[in-house]
Amino acid sequence: MVSHRIGFIGLGEVATVLSRELVKNGAEVRAFDVLSATPEGRSIIKERIRNTGVKLCSIENTVRASQYILSTVPTQEARQVAKMASAYLKKGKLYIDMNSTSPAEKVEIGEIIEASGCEYIEAAILGAIGAEGPRARVLVTGLRGNEVAELFNSLGLNWEWYGENIGKASMFKMLRSVFSKGLECIIVELLLAGMRGGIEEDLWQEVCRFMNQNPFDIVADNWVLSHATACKRRYHEMVQVNETLRDLGIHSVMSRATESFFKRSLEAGIVEAFEKKPDSRKRVIEYLDKQIFGQS
């Protein structure tokens, strides 16, 4: 059995969870984390990898000894880490960038890596590693992305090839976050208001009941379709919602943005453009795109 040599740069939650699974399935795993530069930090890192079979190494040793180098560092450090790693990279190795950076940043980091002769692979984590573990879905792009996805799937992970173009997976992740991170903030704002209003638990139960009883694809599709015809009513309701929040002493962010969004759609003439609910959400989106952003 071939032992695949894998190195992690950055040993936070993502690398810790994935490395355990990789070792369990026969991979030889090394890791470097900047925390290991101090005695206290090294103690923390050693505790994370205790009984995992992962070898704690310098960045040079991690990169030189590994065929697949996975970068799992804080977003703001991704570019600098790529520059550091490139000093030890060479042709035949694959650098797999799993950091949450923009598509444009991915392309630029790819250029840094490929200047060393190493091949660059983009891997965007879509699932929550902390909740889903090593089976969290990951989208992979790059010329050898399909090969990489198949390899890591054979080692117990859940990677899916998404095409050759670097940046495509990150584009998907970034735009998906419009929903996931936006919804997170909406829920938190709702609960803050609910606590002030003394009905926090009632609101939580109502939202959970509604979402559990109704298929999301049907609910979301109807929201988009009815945006065309119910926009005016919803705008005026949000004006009242924000007055209520002000009375509760809540400086809303998401609710004020929602009011502004409905207002923009009204100013774009959406109600006049649709006398009845349209038959497809694409018609709504294409209309707003053209009227607001000037796209045909």
Image (cartoon, rainbow, N blue to C red):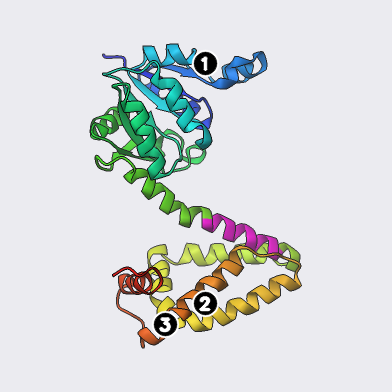
Between tags 2 and 1, which lies in front?
A: 2
Residue 285 visible to the viewer = yes
Can you identify the residue that label 3 sits on? 269
Q: Tell me, yes or no, whether the highlighted magenta stretch contains residue 220.
A: no
Counting from the top left corner in percent of width and height, residue 163 is at 25, 42
Q: Amino acid at mark 2?
A: Lys
Mark-to-mark CA distance, 3 and 1:
63 Å
| Residues shaded magenta | 182-194
Decide: is 118 above or below 160: above
Residue at figure coordinates x 63%, y 66% from the top left: 203
Q: Amino acid at mark 3?
A: Gly
Q: Secondary structure at mark 1?
A: loop
Can you identify the residue that label 2 sits on? 263
Q: Amino acid at mark 1?
A: Asn
Give the overall secondary structure of the magenta segment: helix
Can you identify the residue that label 1 sits on? 51
Residue at figure coordinates x 48%, y 62% from the top left: 212
How many other residues sit within 10 Å of disc 1, few (<14), some (14-19) or many (≥20)?
A: few
Residue 246's quadrant in the figure?
bottom right
Mark-to-mark CA distance, 3 and 2:
10 Å
Q: Which mark is residue 132?
A: none
Q: Tell me, yes or no, whether the highlighted magenta stretch contains residue 191.
A: yes
Residue at figure coordinates x 46%, y 35% from the top left: 133
